[in-house]
Amino acid sequence: MFHNIKKDSIFIADSHFNEKNQELLTILEKIVNKELNPSQLFLMGDIIDFISGESKYFIKINKKVIDLINEISNSIEVFYLEGNHDYNLQKLFPKIKVFKRENQPVKFIYETRSIAMSHGDIFTPWHYNLYCKIIRNTPLLIFLNLIDFGNFISKRIENALLKKTICSEIEDFEFFAKSRLSNYKEEVVVEGHFHQGKTFKNEKQTYVNVPSLCCSKKYMMFDGEFKGVNI
């Protein structure tokens, strides 16, 4: 199944929203207040620094963001490609098209161009795939939530993520982009996850890595081409 991309769509990736990284709120509030008027909103994963549909503590502390995204989904089409920090989200976002990791890449069409999108943590080794299945396992997450007395597990995760350094530059982006493109047949490939905010083109394909909102303070606007925009 293919979905359509419209002009004036906004793409946000890797905002890692937490008490330190608040840039996401700025954009969401501008959309709600009609200072920004996108035709569609694409959330490309790792939007919240950590959340799952089973994690009561993280749902509670991120309620403002969840409510804003749901409010936006009442008026425009929103796509959410789950990342490695945010998953099992459909019940939190009932009107949004949420795509799990195993259902990525997602195929889109713009005019005659075929476009594939993913958060980016796909086409990976078997041990990472196994890890992804374990951390997304609903019974396990429910069990961990039940024994999370005083939120001690959740707060340890939160504190560890707050200390983590996530912004770095890939030295040979051209080589990296070519290796990512080799996994796809589509003309345009759009990914988050890698925090680079760069584009590479060869004769047949274009690779777009959406900038990390928390690292570069940028998102992307699509007007037929993908362009970085400062918040």
Image (cartoon, grey):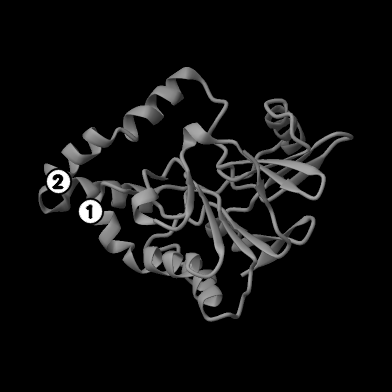
Looking at this view, name the residue that lies furthest to the right.
203
Between disc 2 and disc 1, whose residue precedes?
1
Determine contact: label 2, label 1, CB under 8 Å: yes
Comparing labels 2 and 1, the label whose residue is closer to the camera: 1
Residue under circle 2? 148
Q: x, y (%) of residue 128? A: 45, 25
Disc 2 to disc 1, how far (Cα)? 10 Å
Most extreme residue toward the front is 1
Q: Residue at x 23, y 53 (%)?
A: 56
Under mark 1, the amino acid is Lys
Q: Position of residue 175 (x, y in %)?
A: 75, 30
Q: Residues within 10 Å of mark 2 (few under 14, many from 20)?
A: some
The residue positioned 38% from the left and 48% from the top of the image is 89
Q: Label 2 is placed on what type of residue?
A: Asp
* Nearer-the-camera pick, 43 or 76: 76
| Pointer 1 residue | 56
User: Looking at the picture, how far across and down is residue 88, in whole percent?
Assistant: 36, 43
